[in-house]
Amino acid sequence: MKKLEIRRLAGAMGAEILNVDLANVDEETWEAIHDAYLQHIAIFFPNQQLDVGQFRAWGMRFGSLDTHPYLKPIEGFAPVHELYKGPADKVVFGGEWHADFTFLPVYPQAISLYAQITPAYGGDTLYANRYLAYETLPQRYKDLLESMEAVFSITDFYEGNVQLMRNKIGKQVSGGAVHKVVQVHPETGRKNLLACPAFIKHFVGMTVPESKPLIEFLVRHSTRPELTARYSWKKNTVGIWDNRAALHYAINDYAGMERHMYRLVVSGQEAN
Ligand SMILES: O=C(O)CCC(=O)C(=O)O
Ligand SMILES: [Fe+2]
C-alpha cells in the first residue's frame, strides 16, 4: 500500500487525500481511508473518474445506503440521487447548520457527494467538529449535559428546503426523536455534542423557552470558527463526512450559477 498523501484543511478537522484513485482501492488502502475518515471526519478526493455505479460501490464500503424519502434516485442506480441547484433556484439544500436526519431515532452514519458541476466561485460546504465542541466545554457544562436528552423534529427548514427542489418525490417523513446531547461515537468511542440547530427543539423535561438560552449557547459554541473547516468543491471531487461527528452547512452564495452533485447516504446504526 502506498502511504496516503493527506493535506489537512484546517486545525479543527477535514483533509484532502491526494494520491488515491477511488476506482481502484485495495484492502490496505481502504483501511487507511477509513482511518482517515474517522480521524479527520470529512475527507475529500479530488480528480476522481467514477461512474455512478462506482460511486455507489464506494459508498457501500462504509455500510448499507439509505433511500432518501424526498429525492428521486438516479435511474438504475438507486439509492444514489442528485442535488441540483440551477441559476434561477433560490433555495439551497442544507443551508443551515445540521447533522442529517437527526429527527429520526437512528440517523445516518455518513453523507458522500461527488461533484459534477461546480460554480465558478461559492457553493462551499462548512463543517464543524462535534468532538471538539464537547471537549472544549467547561467541566461544569460537561457534567450538566451528561444526563440531558433533547427532542429533535423535522422543521419548516427542511420541509421548505425540499419543497423547492426539482427532483423531489411526494413522500414526506414525519420525524421526531429523542437523543442524548452528549453522544458516544459508535466507532471511535469519543464523546461529542449534538447541538443541531436545524432540528433540536427543547431538552427533555424543559419547555422550549426554558431550553432556548442553553441551546443557543451550545449552537454558538459548536459552530465557532475555530471548530470548523470549509471545503471548496471542484468538479470530480468525491467527499464523505461522518454525520456522527460533524455538523455541516451548505453555503448559498452562487446565485445565477449551477451546482450539481451526486449524493448518497450511508445508513446509521441503533444508538448505544
Ligand atoms: O450540498 C452540500 O454542500 C451539502 C448539502 C447537505 O446538507 C447534504 O448533502 O446533506
Ligand atoms: Fe445535510
Image (cartoon, rainbow, N blue to C red):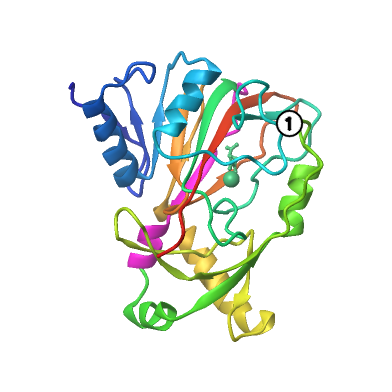
Of residues 232 and 178, the one drawn nearer to the viewer in this rendering: 178
- Looking at the picture, does residue 110 appear above or below residue 75? below
Quarter of the image where the N terminus is located: top left
> Image point 52% across, 65% down: which residue?
195
Look at the image and give the residue range highlighted in magenta.
118-135
Total marks placed: 1
Residue 158 x %, y %? 71, 51
Helix, strand or loop status at disc 1:
loop
Left or right: residue 249 versus residue 15 is: right
* Ligand 1 position by quadrant: top right
Q: Nearer the viewer, residue 184 or 135?
A: 184
Query: Where is the C terminus found, in terms of image quarters?
Result: bottom left
- Give coordinates of residue 270: x percent, y percent: 46, 59
Q: Which residue is mark 1?
A: 255
Instruction: Please say whether residue 102 is one of the residues in the magenta stretch.
Output: no
Which is more toward the observer, 108 or 19?
108
